[in-house]
Image (cartoon, rainbow, N blue to C red):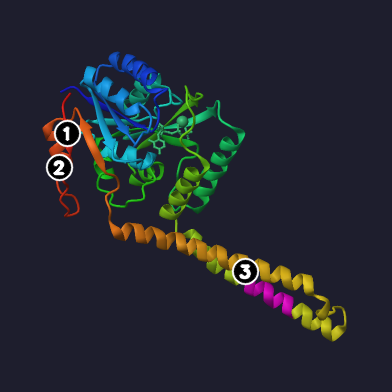
Amino acid sequence: MKESLSIIVPCFNEEHVIPEFYRRLHAVLETMTCSSQIIFINDGSRDTSYTLLQDIARKDLSVKLISFSRNFGHQKAVTAGINYCTTDFALIIDADLQDPPELIPQILETLKREEAQVVYCIRTDRQGETPFKKWSAKMFYRCLNFFSEIDLPVDTGDFRLIDRSVIREFNRLQEKGKYIRGLVPWIGFKQVPFYYEREPRFAGETKYPLSKMVKLASTSMSYFSKKPLTLATSLGFFSVGLALVYGLWSLLGKLFGFTHADSGWTSLVLLIVFFGGIQLITIGIMGTYIGNLFDEVKNRPEYIVEETVNFSDSEQEDMEKPRQGTKRNRRKSYLL
Ligand code: UDP
Ligand code: MG
């Protein structure tokens, strides 16, 4: 039987790039021998993206559409794409053409040649991005690797190809806060890199403002490492040590007359601010973990699908099988 490939594309307010993205992707898929489908996820777009995607799905039945009830975020959109994917392979790609679709045949070829289960794409160059974004991304990946308990490849995004075994394992993960570029390496199997140059965004603006970047960084750190929690203990020991040394120095100074303790107003204020800061930081770190527990315990669904288009009945039923003992409601679904 012919192998099958799904292309998973999250879209949030991408009206300026969708037609060109589809044109380029379609041209590439036509040259490939395996059967393919495109799964667009409309992540609560407020522009005309939804209508554009519907038009494409109406003309091309291999294009499937999952439309969220509101904006749930990029990671949730990719998660939905993987959850709905029934093919042998899935490739995750952004809609803004920063990751060139023309590379897909080579990526698939690498997976087969290396007999790997995952090909993750590493950016050797990121054109058209601000120096701040490049610098923050670089620092972030290095920092995450220091804190993380597993080895995460640096400078990779979600542009990657995964095979059925990884899709199956991914769908068993029950955590709600998903950091996909960390979870795929965590799943394991043979994972190989693929180097490419990231192009500038084709049109429109980034949908990852600083606030979303910080949220993603927080999820990745707190879901992949317990090290920040132990940081509080280290800081505690450090400050006790510092206090002992300072106390001893003051005492000796008093005895031998080389300090004047009562003139230490500045050092007192500095110490109060310093240790007050350390305490607030550690409370904040603990708060982040408690917040995650709170979200996980609530056990809400990760996303709400308002509508699906061009999914067959069997695919739809597969998705609606009760997971974790909870029955899902049947959603609006139709074939165009
Ligand atoms: N995206 C999404 N939901 C969001 C934010 C982004 O589905 O809340 C999609 C977006 O449409 C794009 C991809 O995620 O296809 C990556 O976003 P973007 O290109 O804006 O991020 P950047 O490349 O600037 O980091
Ligand atoms: Mg982008």
Q: Residue 235 at x, y = what percent?
A: 59, 67
Q: Which mark is residue 333?
A: 1
Q: Which mark is residue 204?
A: none
Q: Residue 126 at x, y = what percent?
A: 54, 28
Q: Residue 68 at x, y = what percent?
A: 29, 38
Query: CB of mark 1 within 8 Å of CB of mark 2?
Result: yes
- The span from disc 1 to disc 2 (Cα, nearest Å) is 9 Å
Q: Is residue 98 left or right of residue 143?
A: left
| Residue drawn where x is 46% and y is 48% of the image | 215
Q: Is residue 23 left or right of residue 142?
A: left
Q: Which mark is residue 330?
A: 2
Q: Amino acid at mark 3?
A: Gly
| Nearer to the camera, 236 or 206 | 206
- Per the image, the residue denoted by label 3 is 276
Q: Amino acid at mark 1?
A: Ser
Q: Which residues are magenta?
A: 239-247
Q: Does ligand 1 reach within 8 Å of label 3's beta carbon?
A: no
Query: CB of mark 1 within 8 Å of CB of mark 3?
Result: no
Earlier in the chain: of badge 2 and badge 3, it is: 3
